[in-house]
Amino acid sequence: MRTFFDYFQIASGIAFLSIVFGRALYLRLSRNIQAIAIGGGKRGLVLAVELISFAGLAVWMVEIVLYALHCDFRIFPTPLDTLLFDSNVAKMIGVALISVGLIIFVLAFVSFGDSWRVGFDTKTPGALVTTGLFAVTRNPIYVFLNLWFLGIFLINGRLIFLIFAVLAMAGIHWQILKEERFCTNLYGQAYQDYCDSTGRYVSLRVRANGRAGPT
């Protein structure tokens, strides 16, 4: 029997995809901006990690649907299906984390305006954005992703989702470091000043003004 938590997980994925592809389509049609720049101009380890990360995200979302619909089929071996805990309190905390994350996600898109990109856009990079949510965190979309992965693990309590969460958080941190080097080369001292005044994940105080790069 499916529960609220099952439907909530699926709804969070639908919301994520709707926002991302809806925004990408809007920018393409109204601004002629190709917002999704996955793989463009990259090679070697950077390209491999980026493609593996997006493939991993897709597999993770399929796993969410399989578990939420209580399907017998599993992508990964049975040992990874191990139930670590089954707690309604943990599930509610997971729902809260994902809900907060989705709010952050939406506010990040509002702050981004036309500057939002997926991947490194060297041809038509967006303007430096630092107002709104970017005065609190340099990487609001990555903060959302961390909360989402953690929340899904708490809802399901399965080993496979713990592994996904740990790998995702490590991969996200690695990607942030790569993007910081990209933004430093692109925006120069303005981005360095922004990094000095705003936390990578969260700032304890909000700046009145500033500049922020893409996440």
Image (tube, grey):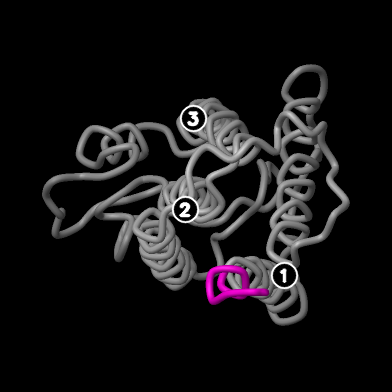
Residue 151's disc is 2
Which residue is label 1 attached to? 21
* Mark 2 or 3, closer to the camera: 2
Sequence-first tag of 3 and 1: 1
* Mark 2 → mark 3, Cα distance in angstroms: 18 Å
Looking at the image, is 179 positioned above or below residue 16?
Answer: above
Local secondary structure at mark 2? helix
Identify the element where label 3 is drawn.
Answer: helix
* Amino acid type for the residue under numbered disc 1: Phe
Q: Quadrant of residue 9?
A: bottom right
Q: Which residues are magenta?
A: 1-8
Q: Main secondary structure of the magenta part?
A: helix
Question: Dot 2, how many residues are within 10 Å of its Cα: few (below 14), some (14-19), or many (20+)?
Answer: many
Q: Amino acid at mark 3?
A: His
Residue at (20% x, 45% y) in the render: 203
Residue 57 falls left or right of residue 196: right
Sequence-first disc among 2 and 3: 2
Given the image, on which type of amino acid does mark 2 rest? Gly
Upstream in sequence: badge 1 or badge 2:
1
Dot in front, 1 or 2:
2
Q: From this viewpoint, is residue 79 visible?
A: yes
Q: Quadrant of residue 163?
A: top right
Between the residue at mark 3 and the residue at mark 1, the CA separation in whole angstroms equals 24 Å
| Residues at circles 2 and 3 in contact by the CB criterion of under 8 Å | no
Q: Is residue 2 magenta?
A: yes
- Whether residue 111 is visible to the viewer of this picture, yes or no, is no
How many marks the image carries: the answer is 3
Residue at horizontal 33%, vertical 41%?
Answer: 201
Quarter-of-image position of residue 110: bottom left
Residue closer to the observer: 176 or 127: 176
Along the line of sight, which residue is nearer the eye, 94 or 15?
94
Element at label 1: helix
